[in-house]
Image (spheres, rainbow, N blue to C red):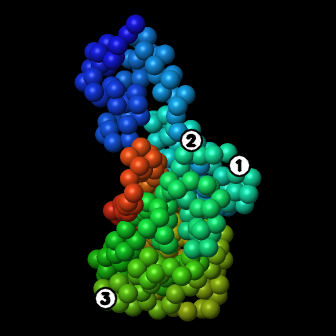
Amino acid sequence: MATLEDVASAAGVAVTTVSRALRNDATLKITPETRKRIFSAAEQVGYEQKRQKTLQARKNIVIVHKDTHFDNQMDNAYYFSMRTGQENACMERGLGYRYVPQSMLRHQAEACDGAVIMGNFSREEVEAIAKAVKTPRLVFTGLMNFYPERMDWVTYDVYGAVELMVRCLADQGVGTVVYFGGDETPDILPRYSKRQVFLSLAGESGLVCRESVYGAHGAENGCRMMFKWLDKGEKLPDAFAASNDPIAIGMLKALAQRGIRVPEDVSVISINGDSPGEFMNPPLTTVDVLTKQLGAETIYTLLDQMETGRAYYKKIEFAPRLLKRGSVK
C-alpha cells in the first residue's frame, strides 16, 4: 500500500506538507498548484483510499447572502467575484458548501460546521442570521461588523479606499466634485461610511464637494440619479465620484447620452474594481478592493476558526489599490 513518503516523492515536497495538505490543514500555506500536484500524486501512487476518508469527513459550511446578490452580474460583480474566490477556496480545501439567500433561512434545517454572512446587513439582520444558521463558528464580510466579539471579520480598508480615490482626484488638479452614493447600512459608524469618509477627506485635500447625491444601488439607479442631477442645469464639476462601480457605470451611460465627454468635460471615479468597468467607454478609473481574494479569505478564516477551536475573533482587512484608467484625466 502506498505511503505518505511515496506521495511526497512523487509530488516533490516534504512528507509533512503532504500530510497537512491531505488533511486540509487551514494553516498550511502552499500554492494551489502545489496542492493540486499533491492530490494528483496521491492518486497516481494509490493513496486514493486514505484521501477518500479525508473527504468523507469534510466539513460543511453555509454562506448566507442577500436575495438580490446574484440577480445580475452588472450590479453584483462584487459578489460574483467574491463567490468565485469562496468556491475556489472550498474546492481547494475539500469543504462542502451551499449558498442560502436570506429569505430562505427559515428552511435551513441541515446542521453545518460554520457559516459566512456575506453582505452589508443591518444589526438586526445579522442577529437573525446568526440564530438561524445554528453554529457558533461565524465569519462576517461587509463594511461594518456589529458583533466583532462573536464572529471573525473579513473586509477591506474603507478609509484607505476612499483616500486613494480622493488623492487621485487631487493629484489631477480637480477643484470641484459631486459625490454619488448608494443607500448605506443603518447605524453604520462614520469610519465605515464611504460617504462620510469622502466628505471628510475631500475637505482636507482641498477638494470642494459641491453636492452629495444618494439613492438606490445599481447601474440603472446610477443612470437615473445622473439624469436627475443634469436636469437641474447646473455647471458641471471637475469630477464625479461614485461609491461603487455599478453606480458609476450608470452615470457614464447618462453622461454619454447627454453628449458629455469623459474625461474631457468631467472625470469619473469610483470604488470596487469590478470587471465590467474595464470595458466601459472610457474604461472606468476605480479603487480595486480585491473581491476575489476577500472571498477566499472568508473561507480560510472560517476553516481556521473551526480547526483550531480558538476562543477569540479577529479582523482581516485588505489594502485596496488604485486602477487608473481612462475616465480620469
Rendering coords of residue 73 (x, y %): 61, 55
Q: Amino acid at mark 3?
A: Glu
- First in sequence: mark 3 vs mark 1: 1
Residue drawn at (62%, 55%) of the image: 133
In the image, 236 versus 297, the foreground residue is 297
In this rendering, the label closer to the viewer, 3 or 1: 1
- First in sequence: mark 1 vs mark 2: 2
Residue drawn at (62%, 80%) of the image: 215
Q: Quadrant of residue 175?
A: bottom left
Residue drawn at (66%, 69%) of the image: 220
Q: Amino acid at mark 1?
A: Ala
Residue drawn at (55%, 68%) of the image: 120
Rendering coords of residue 274 (x, y %): 50, 58
Q: Dot 3 surroundings within 10 Å: few (below 14), some, or many (20 or more)?
A: few
In the image, 279 versus 178, the foreground residue is 178
**Label 3 sits on residue:** 204
In the rendered structure, find residue 60 and report the number of the disc placed on it: 2
In the image, 161 versus 323, the foreground residue is 161
Please say if 49 is above or below 177. Answer: above
In the rendered structure, find residue 109 and report the number of the disc placed on it: 1
